[in-house]
Amino acid sequence: MITTAIALLTIIQGPQRDSSNPDKTTAAQIMSKVFSRYADAQTAVGTVKMTQTALDVTLNIDTELQFDRPGKIYLHQTRNGTHARQWLLTSNGKVFSYDRPDEKLGRDRYQEWVNQNGVEQKIGDLYMASEHSLGELNAILDVAISQPGRLKLLMRQWATLTYKGRVTLNGDLVQKITGEYRENPNGPANGQFEIYVSEAGDFLRYVVYQRFVFPNQTKEPIDVKTVWDSSIKLGVKTDENLYRVVQ
């Protein structure tokens, strides 16, 4: 569960205290606070905007999210451009529905009971049930929804964590964390990441820098920058109408 995820942060970061400065802030301490803050939130409402750039091409996926734990969620994603598309996951706490995965045949949307075989699924379970039916899963959504498996994967992708102090983001003073990123959690680091967190523990921005080489297409490496910006607010009133199950 979340406690296990926080323990993994300690392993990645190393000792939580510097003997020469016992009050020194660490990246693991900050992210532990972030994880706990979102896991403890009963409700959330907001957006996550993804902007990916490579070779002067920009792709956007906008996510609208709201949830009311344990079983109500609305997650709507929109992709722009020539391949524009939308995805939708909704749950009213009893029934949830999501788009047909691309590799599947049949009806356009699937419906399932939240309670299956006597087990009441939570929003993290619904999120994972629809993972192949969404435009993307990302770190901010993973942390907001607090799905344990996704948090463990995320932290294995963070090869290192380094606290960089306070910086200004959109006019506000926030805490910045950087590190080495590995797409394959069992492989070597192949990129870098940045995390921006408010003083209250809100996950405001996540940036990943990667370089790809495609020998059959180009001799030059392709640099890809992906930025996720969040406006998610915790503990606020949700719109019950959005939990309506869409068939």
Image (tube, grey):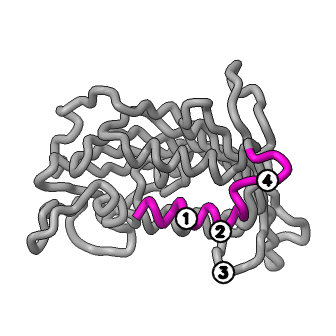
Sequence-wise first label, 2 or 3: 2
First to last magenta residue range = 1-22
Residue 54, visible in the rendered structure: no
Q: Is residue 226 left or right of residue 234?
A: right
Q: Check whether the beta carbons of the residues at disc 1 and disc 2 lie within 8 A of each other.
A: yes
User: Closest to the observer: 195 or 100?
Assistant: 195
Q: Amino acid type of disc 2?
A: Ile
Q: Residue at x 61, y 61 (%)?
A: 9
Q: Which residue is mark 3?
A: 186
CA distance separating discs 3 and 4: 29 Å
Q: Judge whether residue 16 is colored magenta.
A: yes
CA distance separating discs 1 and 2: 7 Å
User: Closest to the observer: 18 or 119?
Assistant: 18
Q: Residue at x 13, y 55 (%)?
A: 95
Q: Closer to us: mark 4 or mark 2?
A: 4
Give the crowd class for mark 1: few <14, some 14-19, many >=20 residues within 10 Å. few
The vertical placement of 109 against 145, above or below, is: below
Q: Is residue 132 left or right of residue 92?
A: right
Element marked by disc 2: helix
Element marked by disc 4: loop
Q: Is residue 158 left or right of residue 76?
A: right
Q: Quadrant of residue 160?
A: bottom right
Sequence-wise first label, 4 or 1: 1
Q: Which residue is mark 2?
A: 11
Element marked by disc 1: helix
Q: Position of residue 147 (x, y in %)?
A: 40, 60
Give the crowd class for mark 4: few <14, some 14-19, many >=20 residues within 10 Å. few
Q: Which mark is residue 7?
A: 1
Q: Closer to us: mark 3 or mark 4?
A: 4
